[in-house]
């Protein structure tokens, strides 16, 4: 699971420094408590070991360093033989006790990405991650990063501005192994905190793929705009940490952020009467690529979360196993035939890794593992055999003596497990074992010959091999879209619901994708949401003939064009807004709060039947928000009550012929810092075509600086930065007023810093 890195230098392991670890203490693995206890048990609460990775570098007071030893954990992994005993085992333990290197990934879809790489390399502490494509990932030693405050401050600002992302090296593996392409429909089942989601979005936009070569925000001004065909649907049940703010900084029309339970993510169907080219004969919306990065105990993150040494629990992975399997089974149901799914955890426990993969393979005969691409850093093959352990109860004498563990009880087969440790009250499940389960006199036939050996195609990453965290990843594919039915489930404990069957907590969808009449099941269509939460959004079609739409386009000088017409003649800067890809954003209170530009892939989700909300999943945001309403009690004299949104300002700068102007570097910097610019400091209150601007929404950019001594490469770099420096403002009688939040403006501030540094060279 994720993502940032511990940055404490070896020479600074004092009390003040170790507080960083206490500040990022995870919610687990000791297990959930309080009001979240039942949610976590049902899979309804997304647990991430470093929920807010942007805050993981902060320091404050603390009592001292955590203990870096846990006898029970060491005994467990030594018994599982994940590392050979002897020198390798000593190196493994030693690596777990050292800080993790800081790793960042550059977002190539943002303007100035090449300058970001140059800047990081010039700092003298960052080196390229050799296996990641195009040199877009760099890392440095934790001690060097922490002892260079200027370096840390610059990287933190770049991270806040969306130019780069803190992401652990092994965390880049799942999205990298998927090979995302611009036309793919991608689902991220458990997206918090969002680094893998951003990686998929970024790859969609920088792929060297003929129709999609130019990123939206940084395409040359004389080139036609290109709209991505794909989708990245980021789902998570934790509303506090869903990656809405982070995905908005990439300003991609392919993005949808939703809130829902991954283990119960509902099937979606194309509207009746529409042609479906996704899967022949199936009206269900299926996904070409799926990132299934499930909640886990997180002991692979010991190097960045040393508090796990004292909170590690053997029972917590046992509780998570069923949730992980449910999420994987549901994700595999949504996978398109021939597609790819990565299952990953930042745990080293085979109960959370190989056991989950084996159980899924046993239940779905049309699902197989795919040999992953060659990754040029050391990995270990997955285990093919393991044992299940359960902590023995402590005696009263041991409790009074403060003995933490009374030892472990080991089981090789499900038949050896006593009834007290089985369901409904026990924590052990038959899906946790590597050996086939005997039911009566017959052996479970779901275990195919050689299935355990197939597990060797999974990858284990251990800290001492490549100076990384611990990680596990498996790549699945599916040959046929055929959901699991009762035939593939154990004969005992079956309980039917309307659209699913659940056995030992594992939900398997019935074959609802193809009904007898070729339409979605009636039960799904009749399902209605019980009510929308405050954060939920609905998206409505734009009526190009409505007075409101015409007024907004005329006021801002926006020429519209249908995407089919544009495909024939090319989308030019003065005619680039596709009406059929624009949708009104409506809040739960039935008020229009924005106008969004979406991709064709995003449109499939927004127009699916039944809607996501019918299955308990609520859309938080979709596409690029390009327009927002002006407050009802503000600027009453304005002819148009809609203004450009900061998220879409750079995009709109190429679509608008009115209400668009540029400033010299000095006035623009004043506007950027103060969020306002008096009228007397505006050289000419006019549009780029010379006509007078009206009171209302405007987009403001920077005049391209000129210097005769610049080379062609330097001019191109300056142009790229200027293309991303646009502000959403409102022109009042007193001057320009910026309508941006601190979060939204951070990226433009970084471009200003980079432009200033470039001009000083």
Image: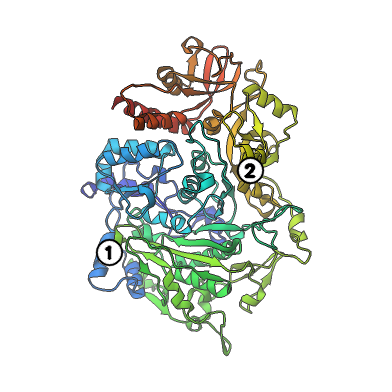
Q: Residue at x 49, y 40 (%)?
A: 215
Q: Is residue 428 above or below residue 538?
A: below
Which picture quadrant has residue 582?
Answer: top right
Location of the C terminus by quadrant is: top left
Q: Residue furthest top?
A: 680
> Of residues 638 and 390, which is closer to you in this image?
638
Residue at image mark 2: 536
Colour pattern: rainbow
Q: Is residue 500 above or below residue 737?
A: below
Spot occupied by residue 459 in the image (x, y as percentages of width and height): 40, 66
Residue at image mark 1: 93
Q: Is residue 46 above or below residue 395?
A: above
Left or right: 290 as drawn, with respect to 611 = left
Spot occupied by residue 158 in the image (x, y as percentages of width and height): 39, 37
- Crowding at dot 1, Cα within 10 Å, few <14 / some 14-19 / many 20+, comes out as some
Q: Is residue 6 above or below residue 749?
A: below
């Amino acid at each position: 699971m994720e993502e940032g890195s511990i940055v404490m230098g070896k020479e600074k392991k004092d009390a003040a420094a170790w507080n960083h670890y206490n500040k990022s203490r995870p919610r687990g693995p000791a297990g959930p408590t309080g009001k979240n206890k039942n949610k976590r048990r049902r899979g309804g609460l997304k647990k991430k070991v470093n929920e807010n990775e942007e805050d993981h570098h902060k320091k404050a007071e603390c009592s001292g360093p955590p203990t870096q030893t846990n006898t029970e954990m060491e005994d467990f992994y030594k018994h599982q033989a994940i590392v050979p005993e002897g020198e390798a085992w000593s190196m493994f333990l030693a690596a777990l006790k050292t800080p993790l290197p800081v790793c960042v990934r550059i977002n190539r879809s943002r303007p100035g990405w090449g300058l970001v790489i140059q800047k990081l390399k010039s700092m003298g502490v960052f080196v390229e991650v050799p296996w990641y494509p195009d040199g877009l990932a760099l890392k440095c030693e934790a001690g060097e990063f922490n002892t260079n405050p200027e370096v840390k401050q610059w990287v933190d600002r770049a991270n806040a501005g969306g130019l780069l992302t803190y992401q652990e090296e092994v965390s880049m593996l799942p999205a990298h192994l998927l090979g995302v392409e611009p036309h793919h429909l991608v689902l991220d089942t458990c997206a918090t905190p969002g680094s893998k989601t951003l990686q998929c979005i970024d790859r969609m936009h920088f792929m060297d793929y003929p129709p999609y070569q130019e990123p939206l925000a940084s395409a040359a001004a004389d080139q036609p705009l290109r709209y991505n065909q794909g989708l990245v649907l980021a789902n998570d049940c934790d509303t506090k940490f869903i990656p809405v703010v982070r995905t908005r900084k990439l300003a991609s029309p392919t993005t949808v952020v939703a809130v829902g339970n991954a283990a119960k993510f509902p099937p979606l169907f194309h509207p009746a009467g529409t042609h479906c080219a996704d899967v022949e004969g199936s009206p269900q919306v299926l996904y070409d690529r799926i990132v299934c990065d499930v909640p886990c105990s997180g002991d692979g993150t010991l190097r960045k979360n040393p508090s796990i040494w004292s909170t590690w629990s053997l029972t917590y992975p046992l509780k998570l196993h069923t949730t992980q399997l449910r999420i994987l089974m549901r994700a595999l149901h949504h996978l398109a035939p021939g597609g790819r799914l990565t299952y990953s955890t930042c745990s080293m426990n085979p109960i959370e890794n190989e056991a989950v993969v084996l159980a899924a393979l046993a239940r779905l005969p049309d699902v197989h593992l795919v040999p992953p691409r060659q990754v040029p850093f050391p990995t270990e093959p997955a285990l093919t055999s393991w044992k299940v352990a359960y902590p023995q109860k402590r005696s009263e004498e041991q409790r009074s003596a403060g003995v933490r563990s009374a030892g472990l009880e080991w089981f090789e087969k499900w038949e050896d497990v006593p009834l007290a440790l089985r369901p409904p009250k026990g924590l052990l499940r038959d899906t946790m074992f590597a050996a086939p389960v005997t039911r009566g006199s017959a052996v479970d036939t779901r275990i195919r010959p050689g299935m355990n050996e197939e597990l060797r195609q999974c990858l284990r990453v251990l800290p001492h091999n490549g100076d990384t965290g611990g990680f596990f990843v498996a790549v699945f594919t599916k040959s046929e879209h055929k959901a699991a039915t009762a035939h593939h489930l154990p004969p005992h404990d079956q309980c039917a619901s309307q659209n699913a069957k659940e056995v030992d907590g594992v939900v398997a969808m019935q074959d609802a994708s193809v009904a007898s009449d070729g339409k979605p099941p009636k039960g799904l269509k009749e399902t209605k949401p019980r009510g929308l939460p405050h954060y939920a959004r609905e998206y409505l079609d734009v009526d190009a003939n409505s007075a409101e739409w015409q007024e907004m386009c005329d006021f801002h000088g926006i020429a519209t064009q249908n995407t089919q017409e544009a495909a024939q003649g090319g989308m030019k800067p003065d005619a680039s807004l596709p009406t059929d890809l624009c949708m009104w954003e409506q809040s739960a209170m039935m008020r229009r709060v924005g106008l969004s530009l979406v991709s064709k892939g995003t449109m499939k989700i927004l127009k699916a039947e039944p809607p996501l909300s019918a299955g308990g999943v609520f859309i938080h945001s979709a596409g690029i928000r390009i327009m927002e309403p002006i407050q009802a009690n503000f600027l009453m004299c304005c002819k148009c009550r809609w203004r450009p949104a900061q998220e879409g300002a750079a995009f709109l700068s190429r679509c608008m012929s009115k209400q668009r102007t540029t400033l010299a570097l000095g006035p623009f910097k004043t506007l950027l810092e103060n969020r306002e610019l008096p009228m007397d400091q505006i050289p000419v209150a006019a549009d780029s075509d010379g006509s007078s601007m009206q009171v209302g929404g405007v987009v403001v950019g920077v005049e391209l600086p000129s210097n005769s001594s610049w080379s062609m490469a330097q001019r191109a770099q300056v142009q790229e930065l200027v293309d991303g420096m646009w502000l959403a403002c409102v022109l009042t009688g007193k001057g320009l007023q910026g309508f941006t939040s601190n979060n939204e403006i951070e990226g433009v501030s970084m471009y200003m810093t980079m432009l200033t540094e470039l001009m000083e060279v």
